[in-house]
């Protein structure tokens, strides 16, 4: 294996690294270790994600860390790792691999390859490589950072990264201005040490109608990751399932697995602050006092030649979600979670956000969408109603216009076969400066028979 990480005396060679990990020998070894056939591995369906690891001793303990882990750990210990081994943790390790093209949700890195990097830059862009088995580079992704998709009538957060090539301190703080839909938002009193960066964000509410907005961003100091952001506002309502009929049939329907959806259940970010570190120094100013029999007198003065000490306030947020699917209360023959097809089910979905950050740093869960097996978890869905807001949010079905009793329910098709009827709910719009948190949760009822078994035609006198 070629050297991956520079160590000062021995330099890594990017061409050798690429050749090694793209070689047939190495890829066949990976295929064997993972249990995937070599032919399947290289047929274009798979990619290899590489992360270099550095081994080092810090505070008397031995560590093995990727660049992302080192940067996150440095945030936790207030910059002490960077102060101890900056050349390894914030230069040689993160710059050992980075993407030339955006891929797998990670952006291409276009910054300096000879300077030490900030934690935010490392976490977002550095210390990783991707081996793909197709010749063409991946197409640009809408999630590359140039735009965001938001829902209508939703509290959201739009972030940018502000980098400081020179120290931005309390004597001359930075201000970042966001202009959104004829409104102006300003973030003031930003301080960042030299060579570092920080996320700066605005929390705002989206319009009530679908549209695309351009968010323009400007700063008084430092450089921004972007000055223009496209915000696409979409409406998820209006896709309720059609009226179920007693004459509906199974047709060619077959069961499918619940599709995978983008899930992110935790995020971390930080905010710089600074305080003055006094360092009083006596400035000599010797003067001759008197004539021939005079003497020297130091008429100097004390001068504070101190500096600013910078530290981070580190924040994080996590999302946990679950749901309960049960027969509707009006189902006459339900028992626990067992019921017949043709009747309605009810849902309770919960989303809990755990964070110590100020409320300006996050939103709680605002959107939940339920998908159903009879539609193969696509085509139609139900946008749930927020029944309890806050850090412990709850969602339920909206009133069903096809329900005789106007119940908050969804009807299981009368043709649905016996077995598990599983509803999938995607919970989202938990916004943080480090992106949106989301979760996937599912629950089932057991189908045994149909409602036809509960009704019969009888002759009366």
Image (cartoon, rainbow, N blue to C red):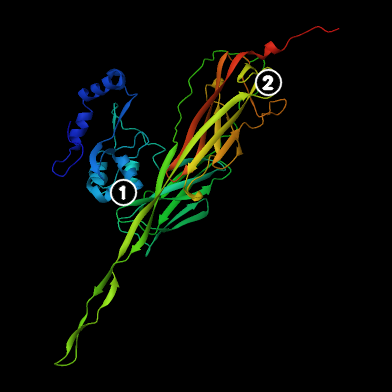
- Residue placed furthest toward the front: 60
Q: Which residue is mark 2?
A: 331
> Does residue 60 sit above or below 191 in this rendering?
above
User: Between residues 21 and 438, which one lies in front from this camera angle?
Assistant: 438
Label disc, if present, on residue 118 of the rendered structure: 1
- Residue placed furthest toward the right: 461
Left or right: residue 117 versus residue 426 is left
Residue 126 seen by the camera: no
Mark 2–mark 1 contact, CB under 8 Å?
no
Secondary element at tag 1: loop
Left or right: residue 402 versus residue 190 is right
Q: Quadrant of the N terminus?
A: top left
User: Between residues 118 and 278, which one lies in front from this camera angle?
Assistant: 278
- Residue found at x 48% / y 20%: 257
Q: Residues within 10 Å of mark 2 (few under 14, many from 20)?
A: some
Left or right: residue 66 versus residue 431 is left
Left or right: residue 295 versus residue 236 is left
Q: Residues within 10 Å of mark 1 (few under 14, many from 20)?
A: many
Quarter of the image where one finds residue 192: bottom left
- Residue found at x 83% / y 8%: 460
Percent from the top left, x then y, of residue 255? 51, 16
Q: Work out whether mark 2 precedes mark 1 in sequence or the reverse, and give the earlier one.
A: 1
Percent from the top left, x then y, of residue 212? 50, 43
Label disc, if present, on residue 257 of the rendered structure: none
User: Between residues 34 and 392, which one lies in front from this camera angle?
Assistant: 392
> Does residue 353 sit above or below 239 in this rendering?
below
Percent from the top left, x then y, of residue 103? 34, 34
């Amino acid at each position: 294996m070629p050297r991956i990480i520079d160590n000062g005396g021995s330099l890594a060679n990017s061409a050798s690294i690429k050749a090694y990990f793209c070689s047939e020998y190495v890829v066949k070894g990976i295929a064997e270790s993972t249990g995937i056939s070599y032919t399947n591995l290289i047929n274009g369906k798979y990619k290899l994600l590489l992360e270099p690891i550095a081994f080092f001793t810090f505070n008397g303990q031995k560590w093995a860390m990727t660049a992302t882990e080192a940067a996150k750990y440095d945030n936790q210990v207030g910059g002490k790792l960077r102060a101890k081994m900056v050349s390894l943790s914030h230069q040689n390790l993160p710059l050992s691999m980075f993407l030339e093209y955006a891929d797998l949700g990670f952006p291409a890195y276009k910054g300096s390859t000879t300077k030490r990097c900030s934690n935010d830059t490392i976490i977002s862009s550095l210390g990783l490589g991707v081996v793909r088995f197709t010749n063409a580079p991946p197409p640009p992704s809408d999630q590359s950072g140039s735009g965001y998709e938001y829902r209508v009538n939703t509290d959201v957060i739009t972030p940018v990264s502000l980098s400081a090539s020179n120290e931005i301190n309390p004597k001359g703080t930075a201000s970042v201005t966001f202009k959104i839909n004829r409104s102006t938002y300003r973030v003031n009193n930003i301080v960042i040490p030299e060579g570092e960066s920080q996320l700066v964000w605005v929390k705002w509410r989206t319009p009530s109608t679908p549209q695309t907005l351009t968010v323009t961003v400007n700063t008084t100091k430092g450089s921004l990751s972007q000055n223009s952001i496209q915000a696409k506002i979409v409406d998820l309502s209006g896709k309720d399932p059609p009226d179920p009929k007693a004459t509906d049939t199974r047709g060619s329907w077959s069961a499918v697995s619940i599709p995978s959806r983008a899930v992110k259940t935790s995020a971390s970010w930080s905010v710089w602050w600074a305080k003055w570190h006094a360092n009083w120094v006596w400035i000599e100013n010797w003067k001759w006092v008197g004539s021939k029999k005079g003497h020297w007198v130091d008429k100097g003065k004390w001068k504070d030649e101190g500096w600013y000490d910078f530290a981070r306030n580190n924040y994080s947020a996590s999302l946990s979600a679950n749901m309960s699917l049960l027969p509707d209360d009006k189902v006459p023959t339900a028992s626990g979670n067992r019921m017949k097809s043709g009747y309605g089910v009810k849902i309770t979905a919960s989303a809990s956000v755990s964070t110590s950050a100020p409320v300006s740093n996050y939103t709680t869960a605002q959107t939940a969408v339920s998908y159903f097996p009879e539609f193969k978890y696509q085509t139609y869905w139900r946008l749930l109603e927020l029944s309890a807001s806050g850090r412990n949010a709850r969602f339920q079905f909206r009133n069903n216009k096809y329900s005789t009793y106007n119940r908050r329910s969804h009807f299981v098709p009368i043709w649905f076969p016996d077995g598990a009827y599983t509803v999938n709910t995607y919970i989202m719009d938990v916004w943080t400066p480090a992106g949106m948190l989301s979760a996937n949760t599912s629950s089932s009822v057991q189908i045994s028979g149909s409602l036809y078994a509960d009704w019969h035609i009888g002759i009366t006198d």
